[in-house]
Image: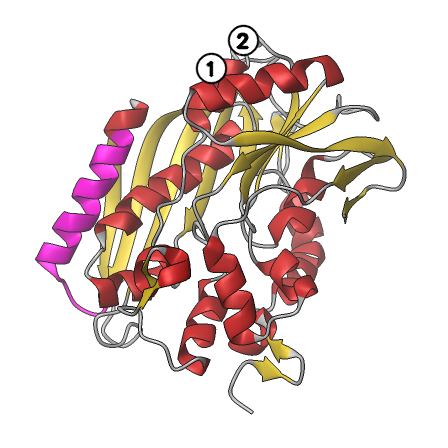
Amino acid sequence: MSSGETRSGLTYRGAGVDVGAKARLLEGLAPAITSTYTDAVGAGLGAFAGAVRLAPPGAGFLLATVDGVGTKTLIARQMGRDDVIGWDIVAHCANDLAACGARPIAFLDYVAMGWLDPPLIRVLVEAMARACALLGVPLIGGETAEMPDVYAGDAYEVVGTMIGQAPLDGLLTGAGTVPGDRLVGLGSSGLHTNGYTLARRIVEAAGASLHDRVEALDTTLGGALLAPHLCYAEGLLSLLGSIEIRAAAHITGGGLVDNLVRVLPDGCRARVLREWPEPPIFLWLQQAGRVSEEEMVRTFNLGIGMVVVTAPQDAARAVRYFEAACIPAQQIGEIVEGPRGVDLA
């Protein structure tokens, strides 16, 4: 039996990433983290971005988020497509801010590798700069670290920090969500930036090559896995002025269940109807790795990159708006009364 495999198929935990252990660790660290909070904190542990109130009163919130691209970098290296990584980190961070109702105002990057690779750095930074320019966000700084005893071969890591701002009454926390509200799902292009450790194990176990063209994917396997992380920030933020958005969840590590629950208040339960078209890469991964349905749900986004919660009367309008902005969207469920959680049907 290969590494990362159980009798029922490959798992994320078996591949080396234990999402549950991370959640338990964070829960244990919560007292230390929250002990630093002041009255200025508007959103902290569990939010997609942290928020603090600006002075003077009424000036709004300053938000910050930090994240990485993970082992998608290893696939980008093999395919010679490191530019995708530069785009992805900006899109990921912008989506996290937008999920909190914040407009991005500045971005910083961190790139680490075994030894300096100037052509690679140029490709990454220029891609980040293009993504930032499309969002109107200045790339104000960064750090390049050389650590030959940490990173082997040509492996590298990319992390981004994005700063945002939201008006005092514009912070999206999910507190106003009530039973009867609708769920609008925004389609993903593929894995985005999560689940790649498991995906790579599946490719390896299947004896496949990233350069293999797969008819069902209409591209190479590596091409499907490198589909860029879609950026929903501009579309979502421009909708805030005309439709009351109750909450938004960026679907990253942990899938729909672990991310959507983060924006649900007590007494509200999300009922998700899994009727959207899924990018074919997910079926390929599930079949090639004999991955259980439960494992797929908690590891991958399965075709939904963000969920927006709206009042019932606004859901259809929101779908039309996103579609007009070339963002695939459809209603995927509703909020019902019940213990805080997410049900997929």
Q: Quadrant of residue 206?
A: bottom left
- Marks 2 and 1: CB-CB under 8 Å? yes
Q: Is residue 146 left or right of residue 106?
A: left
How far from the left and from the top, in percent, is residue 107? Answer: 32, 34
Q: Is residue 325 left or right of residue 44?
A: left
Does the magenta segment cover residue 224? no
How far from the left and from the top, in percent, is residue 274? Answer: 68, 45
Distance Cα–Cα, label 2 vs label 1:
6 Å
Tally of numbered discs: 2
Q: Is residue 221 left or right of residue 9?
A: left
Q: Quadrant of the N terminus?
A: bottom right
What's the magenta region? 113-132
Find numbered disc 2 in the image and state the secondary structure of the residue it sits on.
loop
Q: Quadrant of residue 88?
A: top left
How far from the left and from the top, in percent, is residue 169? Answer: 62, 12
Rate crowding at label 1 as few (under 14), some (14 to 19) or many (20 or more) other CA atoms within 10 Å: few
Which residue has dot 2 on it?
Answer: 241
Disc 1 marks which amino acid?
Ser
Residue at figure coordinates x 57%, y 22% from the top left: 319
The label on residue 238 is 1
